[in-house]
Amino acid sequence: MKIVVIGLGYIGLPTAIVLAKARHQVVGVDVNRRIVNRLNNLEIKSEEPFLKEGFDEVANSGNFIAKTDVELADAFIITVPTPNKKDMLRSCDLTHVIEAVRSVLPYLQSGNTVIIESTVGPKTTEHEIVPLIESTGLKVGTDIHLLHCPERVLPGKIMYELIHNDRIIGGVTPACSEAGMALYRTFVKGKLIPTNASTAELSKLMENTFRDVNIGLANELVKIGNELEIDALEVIKLANHHPRVNIHQPGPGVGGHCLAVDPHFVIAAAPITAKLISEARTINQRMPAYILSKVEEIMTNIDGKKIVVFGLTYKGNVDDTRESPAMDIYFELQRAGKYQIVAYDPHVDLNFVEREMQIALENADLLLILTDHSEFQYVDTSNMRNKVIFDTKSIVQRVSDEAQLLNLGNIFKIANEKVRN
Ligand code: SAJ
C-alpha cells in the first residue's frame, strides 16, 4: 500500500517507520523543510530507543522518503499536534489538523482511507472532518473511509508500543472501521477494536484524563498528609496493596503533551458537567506553587542561599521539556531572584543548564529534585554546604548519612523544625 503520513513529530515519524518496516511505501510529509532535509540526509537526533535504527533501516530500504508536499496515495494518516487553544477553557486547537486535511483534499480519490491519529475533542471527526472531505464531492463511508485511530504510546517505549498495544479503530461508518482494521492489521500485534469515531475520540481523552485525575488525588493526599502529619507516600504504598486500588504517584505537577493537555478537551466539550476533571486539573496545575511554598519554608529554616534544581523535563528519562512543571518551578525561582539557582539535567541541552553534577552541587544549601531521572538515584552530597534534599519524585535511593532527605511524604517535618539548622 502507498501511505502518506502527515506530521513527522514524535508519533508521525515512528508510525511512518513501522509502516515502512511492514513493507508499505511510505511518504512522510512535514511542512518544516528542515525536518524533511534532515531526514533525507539520514540525520536523526532522538533519545527514543530504537528510533534511529528503525529509521536507518527503512530509509536505506527505499520504503520511506520525506517530502514537504502531499501526493497521491491509498491512505493518509494525520499525526500533527493539537495543542490547547488560548481560550478560557483551553479547548482543542484544530488548526494543524484542518490544514493537514486540506492538504490531502486535492489528492483524494475514491477508495482512499483517511485516518486522524492526532488527539482531538469529542465529535471532531464527524462535525469538522466529514464536511471538509465531502466538500470534494466524495462521500464518507462509500467513497472515502474516514477514521479516528488514536495513538497511545509511551515516550521511551514508542517503537515497542506502536506494534504491541491494542488499538481503537474508530470509523465514521462500519465500512470505514473495516478499512482501518485492514490497514492496522499489517503492523499491529495488539488487539484491534472497532468502534465509531466519536467513541474513539472520547476513549483516548479519558485514558489520559483517568491518569490526570488519579494523580490529582495523590497530590491532594500529599496536602492532606501534610496537614495531618501523616506520611502520604506510605499511605499510597499501603493502600495499593489492596488488589483493586492503584493510587498514582504525587509530584511537582503534571506535564507533557498529553496528560496536561487532553483533559481540557473534555472539559471544553462539557464544561458544566466535567467538574471532577476540572478540579483535578486545578489541583495538578497548582502543584508547582505548592512545591515553591515548601522550598521557601525549607530555605527559611536553614538560612539557605543556593538551590540546585535537578531535572527539568516533564518526566524521568526523557529529553522533553514541553509543559514541564519542573521548568515552571525553575523559572519561578529565577524570577523571584531571592536565591542563587543552578539547574542540572543530563538529558537537557540548554545553555543555562550546568553540565557537571558536582559543580552544580558546590556549596548548595538545598537540592531540589523535580524529575525522576535514573541518574538521580544516588547523589553524592559531599560538595553541598547544607546537605538538604527535597526529592519531589521519590527517586533518591541512597544518600550519605549526614544528608537530610525530605519528600512529599515527610515534608510536614519542616514545620516542626526537624530540619537541621
Ligand atoms: N505523573 C505523576 N504521577 C504519576 C504518573 C505520572 O505525577 O503517577 C506525571 C509525570 O511526571 C508527567 C505526567 O504525569 O509529568 C505525564 O506522564 P505519563 O507518564 O503519565 O504520561 P505521558 O504524557 O508521558 O504519556 C501518556 C501515556 N499514558 C499512559 O501512560 C496511560 C501514553 O500511553 C499516552 O499515549 C500518551 O500519554 C499520549 O500520547 O496521550
Image: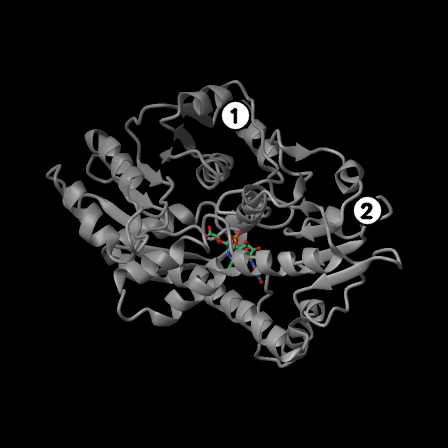
The residue that mark 2 highlights is 384
Of 364 and 40, the residue lying toward us: 364
Relative to 47, does residue 43 appear above or below in the rendering? above
Q: Along the horizontal axis of the image, is 299 left or right of 120? A: right
Give, as a three-letter code, the residue at label 1: Ala
Label whose residue precedes the other's in the sequence (2 or 1): 1
Snapshot quadrant of residue 97 = top left
Give the x, y percent position of residue 107: 23, 30
Relative to 142, does residue 393 appear above or below in the rendering? below
Taking the spot 32% from the left edge, 52% from the top edge, the residue there is: 90
Taking the spot 48% from the left edge, 60% from the top edge, the residue there is: 286
SS at mark 2 in the image: loop
Of 184 and 45, the residue lying toward us: 45
Q: Along the horizontal axis of the image, is 177 left or right of 259? A: left
Q: Along the horizontal axis of the image, is 207 left or right of 408? A: left
SS at mark 1 in the image: helix
Give, as a three-letter code, the residue at label 2: Met
Quadrant that contains the N terminus: top left
Relative to 339, does residue 268 appear above or below in the rendering? below
| Residue 253 appears in the picture as rendered | no
Give the x, y percent position of residue 124: 25, 52
Give the x, y percent position of residue 267: 32, 62
Taking the spot 39% from the left edge, 35% from the top edge, the residue there is: 7
The residue that mark 1 highlights is 59
Q: CA distance from mark 2 to mark 1?
A: 49 Å
Of 357 and 100, the residue lying toward us: 357
Quadrant that contains the C terminus: bottom right
Taking the spot 68% from the left edge, 48% from the top edge, the residue there is: 373
Give the x, y percent position of residue 128: 20, 48
Disc 2 or disc 1, which is closer to the eye? 2
